[in-house]
Image: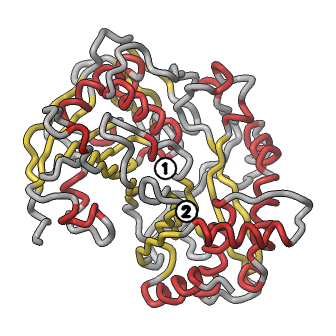
Amino acid sequence: MAAAKSVERLSQRLVTPAEPTPAGPLRLSWLDRYPTQMALIESLHVFKPALERDGDGACPARTIERALAQALVQYYPLAGRLGFTDDGGLLHVDCGGDGSGVWLTEAEAACGLEDVEYLEHPMMISKDELLPPTPAAEKDERKLVLLVQVTTFACGGFVVGFRFSHAVADGPGAAQFMAAVGEFARGNSAATTVEPQWGREAIPNPATAVIGSLPSPEGAKSLEYLAMDISAEYIGHYKAQYNDASHGGSWCSAFEVLVAKAWQSRTRAAGFEPDSDVHLCFAMNARPLLHASLPRAGAGFYGNCYYIMRVSAPAGKVAGSSIPDVVKIIKDGKRRMPAEFKRWATGEAGANGGEDPYQITADYRTLLVSDWSRLGFAEVDYGWGPPAHVVPLTNLDYIATCILVKPWAHKPGARLITQCVTPDRVAAFHQGMLDMN
């Protein structure tokens, strides 16, 4: 089916908070203002039709629009616009000014979700058809905090496309807001279960922090997309191996197992020199380390609050070790996180030209891993049940990435979305992931 032209945008409306909200600037934290946070993070959330809602006349776009207006009363900074210094540096969020609000695009598709295989890769509908466009009225796209598009399909299912500024919310924060919209969409007329907290002054602002250069495609390799569904039995197999290896009676998570397997399979497939170091980078939630300074001990805080851990080892060791031993390398790195975060927060790490732990690199030897499986996106419910699946979108095909998401609803296991090897190495990487010997 030629589905690429089957989406029609019906309208685009500015959704404002349902009640009056405070006006004025809210200062962003050091981490909010970090240069890479200026990107709009894009994702698609695919919802199947709900049989029990057949004939009730409910329109997903209108339901979400009303809920969005209600949620923005508490989350009013998301209706604001980013403010910059004269030299282009990110500074604050301007709340309640003229033109503030969240742009919501309503669209419809002439086909059913089954006709486009529920947007499995390769997608039969371009992502640009399902993501909200920037309105002509917005002269500077950099200032936008949030855009939403709801596309209803002929089957009654729908897709919600988000473009969400990383400067205002991290992954858990964005999911917290979406869950709040879901609560109102399901008929909750009172305040949301989790009370949102701004509290950006609680995030460390080290005077000596180093800010590294932004990633550049110059000289970088073009990487190939590959998505894999991982069974619960596969994960259990390697967890049992780790337990049998008697690592001090500790346990390992599905994340650690799958990242270890992906890191090893990629290292083998890429053919790095055994003596050269390969690196693994992943974000860790820093809220538990800031309980004393965050409002309500971090409950409801939706700003950026994470630290990027970097684990390194010789390629020969990663390629030649057992999976339990690679898991141990990752665990050893995670145990360093509190001490490393403290060194960064106090300015010690950045003194005397130190390294920038938040720097994202296009170095092919570095694999950047994200865990979307526990952020809360898969539990968001607008009244039609949770999404069948969530599709994180990446626009940089020269940064080696591996994203762990939940599998299709009601299925055990996990899904790995990777873009981490060159096209000529994809088959070897895939075979390495399948090999359980």
Q: Does 266 appear above or below 50?
A: below
Q: Nearer the viewer, residue 350 or 308?
A: 308
Instruction: Inspect this view and state whether residue 356 appears.
Output: no
Local crowd at mark 1 within 10 Å, few (<14), some, or many (≥20)?
Answer: some
Residue drawn at (56%, 82%), measured in percent from left and top? 434
The reply to whether the C-beta atoms of the residues labelled 1 and 2 are less than 8 Å apart is no
| Residue 347 in the figure: left or right of residue 149 | right
CA–CA distance between discs 1 and 2? 31 Å
Name the residue type under label 1.
Thr
Give the quarter of the figure containing the N terminus. bottom left
Q: Nearer the viewer, mark 1 or mark 2?
A: 2
Residue named by callout 1: 36
Residue 63 pos. (x, y %): 23, 30
The disc placed on residue 413 is 2
Residue at the front extreme? 52
Please identify the quarter of the rendering in which residue 250 is found: bottom right
Residue 417 pos. (x, y %): 47, 66
The disc placed on residue 105 is none
